[in-house]
Image: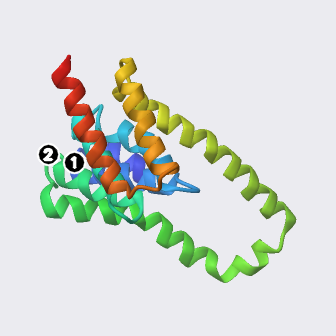
Amino acid sequence: MSLPALRYLTPSHPLAVFDSFYRAGSLVFGGGHVVLPLLQAEVVPPGWVSNEQFLAGYGAAQAVPGPLFTFAAYLGAVMGPRPNGWAGGAFALIAIFLPSFLLVVGALPFWDALQARAQFQAALRGINAGVVGLLLAALYHPVWTSAIHAPADFALALAAFGLLTLWRVPPWLVVAFAAAGGSAIAALQ
């Protein structure tokens, strides 16, 4: 029996959490930002995490080095129902990384043969092209739609983008700048 079917047959919150993070981890290809809309759809609508907590955690995850998948640990820790706290963070982190580990273990013996096939290379190029669209979708919703409401918000986002790309300011400093700028904009309104 598959995990999603078991989730709906068994009214277990820990099983629902594991299924949500495992499924998000198994559907991601090409970068952690692709997982953002998947995770939001899994944790915000059922009320496990508020949209504000979700976006705050995403902002904090951008300020620290490492894979965006570690954002799952934050979500597991701040979740309303149990498992939460340290146990919930570890539980969500294991669930989101497990599909990748299983894929590596399963594909490693065949990797050299797969890599040499033109069809496999073409499939990877197609998947990578699709990931670009998913990344843009992740930027637009939930990030853009929840953060850009006025020209001042757009100016702050543009300034943060410039700091990151043109002046190569460290991401943690840009996040601090954007938080201070957002607070200033809110105080002026």
Residue type at mark 1 is: His
Tell me the residue that label 2 is attached to. 81
Quadrant, the N terminus: bottom left
Q: Please tell me in which quadrant of the rendered image residue 121 appears.
A: bottom right
Quadrant, the C terminus: top left
Give coordinates of residue 79: x percent, y percent.
18, 47
Outermost residue, right direction?
Answer: 118
Give coordinates of residue 167: x percent, y percent.
47, 52
Q: Is residue 111 left or right of residue 96?
A: right
Mark earlier in primary sequence (1, 2): 1
Please rate how many residues cluster around mark 1, counting C-alpha atoms within 10 Å: few if below 14, some from 14 to 19, many from 20.
few
Name the residue rendered at 26%, 48% in the picture: 176
Residue type at mark 2 is: Pro
Residue 112 visible, this orientation: yes
Residue 13 has which mark? 1
Give coordinates of residue 17: x percent, y percent.
28, 50
Helix, strand, or loop for circle 1?
helix
Q: Nearer the viewer, residue 6 or 99?
A: 99
Q: Is residue 61 left or right of residue 35?
A: left
Marks 1 and 2 in Cβ contact (< 8 Å): yes
